[in-house]
Amino acid sequence: PKQVLDIKQFLEITRRKDAVSARVKKNGDKYKFKVRCSRYLYTLVVNDKQKALKLRQSLPPGKYPYFLLYFLIVTFLICGVLNIRLYIALSIQEI
């Protein structure tokens, strides 16, 4: 993984041909933009909500950004251990 500190450089990375997907994670007041490329996972951390919304709009179409919320991890004990994990991915518009 690599961290990018410049927004313009991050946008250039998202427009590369090997950029497969983009996603956004919210952790308190921080927004982490992650772009998966063929070799590295690039991360940009933004502390301002307005900048995060503008950056989300600047992402190229086709790189579907998701705001990942991990709601529930339930473990059942039925004849041993059965792990059921519920992951819900919501659209970034939920920010």
Image: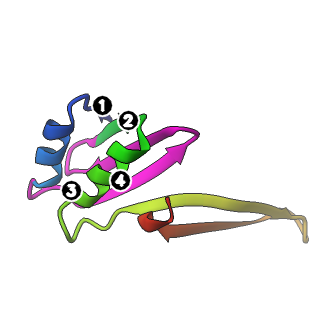
Label 1's element? strand
How far apart marks 3 and 2 lie (CA) works out to 15 Å
Which mark, by number, is residue 53? 4
The kind of residue tagged 1 is Gln
Q: Which residue is mark 3?
A: 58
Q: Along the horizontal axis of the image, is 54 left or right of 45?
A: left
In terms of sequence position, does the residue under pointer 1 or pointer 2 come before the other? 1
How far apart marks 2 and 4 lie (CA) works out to 13 Å
Q: Residues within 10 Å of mark 4 (few under 14, many from 20)?
A: some
Q: Which residue is mark 1?
A: 3
Label 2's element? strand
Q: Residues within 10 Å of mark 1 (few under 14, many from 20)?
A: few
Location of residue 43 by image quarter: top left
| Residue at 58% over, 69% down | 88
In terms of sequence position, does the residue under pointer 1 or pointer 4 come before the other? 1
| Residue at 25% over, 32% down | 4
In terms of sequence position, does the residue under pointer 2 or pointer 4 come before the other? 2
Q: Position of residue 79 (x, y in %)?
A: 91, 70
Q: Along the horizontal axis of the image, is 72 left or right of 87?
A: right
| Residue at 20% over, 31% down | 6
The quadrant in which the N terminus is found is top left
Which mark, by number, is residue 45? 2
Residue segment shown in magenta: 16-41
Q: Nearer the viewer, residue 82 or 4?
A: 4
Does residue 34 belong to the magenta stretch?
A: yes
The kind of residue tagged 2 is Val
Asked whether disc 1 touches disc 2, contact meaning CB atoms under 8 Å apart, the reply is: yes
Does residue 5 belong to the magenta stretch?
A: no
